[in-house]
Amino acid sequence: MESLESLNLSGCQKLENFPEIRGNMELLSELLLARTAIWELPPSIGQLSGVSLLDLRSCEKLVRLPGSVSKMRKLKILIVKGCSRLPNFPETLGDLNQMEELYAGNSAIWKLSDSIGNLSKLKVLSLRRGRKVKHQTSCSLMLPSYWGFYGLRELKSLDLSGCNLSDNLTVALTNLPSLVELNLSRNKFISLPDSIRQLSHLRYLDITHCQELEQLPTLPPNIEDYMQKIFWPNDVLQICQCTLG
């Protein structure tokens, strides 16, 4: 099937195995396997070098991604949200240097390695956790070190809601100069780092339901202008519906 450009098997709920890739399928640009019973992709998946969209959302039996995924060098969008048994990304994830959007919310992923900083074109990263998701870990999401985020110079949207983040895990977030939207709702930090003011492009900050939050630092000027324009008329800072000490 050398001319195949899109393969959509989404919703085939009894499909447990994806076949080994044999032959030339370089024209395939979309592989859609959402809501299937697949628990693992074959190592030969890396031969699909032309795929730009890989959709595995709600594959609740998926337990691992092979390291060969990193050979899909044209991959721009990876969706594994709702993969509630998937505990981690392959260590070679950072080799996907064309990646622009990564959605892994409501998965079992508990740690991001420093290699994620190699995704220099990444614009959207979502790791949000819902309140009631089967098999989802209750431990805090382990973020990369401060310098691990340094390479994400184009990241504009970051969603870490419900990830049980504490104070010492939020410092690395201030090393994202292009960030426009930051969702930190339903986390456990007591305060935000003073260096958050360095996020000069930040316009949307969601810290709703951060029930242990006690104080806020000086916020970036753009977000203050935005909140004054949108929220001050009602004398309610709706973007910060948190329990303050």
Image: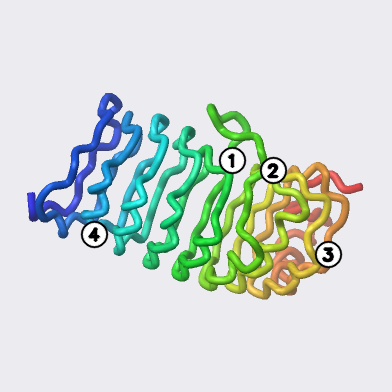
Q: Residue at x 82, y 55 (%)?
A: 191
Q: Residue at x 68, y 53 (%)?
A: 206
- Determine which residue is flagged by label 2: 164
- Determine which residue is flagged by label 1: 129
Q: Earlier in the sequence, mark 3 or mark 4?
A: 4
Q: Amino acid at mark 1?
A: Arg
Question: For mark 4, does the 10 Å Cα neighbourhood hold few (<14), some (14 to 19), or many (20 or more) residues?
Answer: many
Q: Amino acid at mark 3?
A: Pro
From the top left corner, tell me how far across and down residue 13 is, in percent. Answer: 30, 26
**How far apart are the two marked residues, 2 and 1, measured between alpha carbons?**
9 Å
Secondary element under disc 1, as helix, strand or loop, is: loop
Q: Amino acid at mark 2?
A: Asn
**How far apart are the two marked residues, 4 and 2, measured between alpha carbons?**
36 Å
Q: Earlier in the sequence, mark 4 or mark 2?
A: 4
Q: With respect to residue 106, does 235 lie above or below?
A: below
- Determine which residue is flagged by label 3: 217
From the top left corner, tell me how far across and down residue 46 is, in percent. Answer: 26, 53
- Report which quarter residue 153 is drawn in: bottom right
Q: Residue at x 48, y 67 (%)?
A: 118
From the top left corner, tell me how far across and down residue 27 is, in percent. Answer: 15, 59
- CB under 8 Å between callouts 2 and 1? yes
- Determine which residue is flagged by label 4: 49
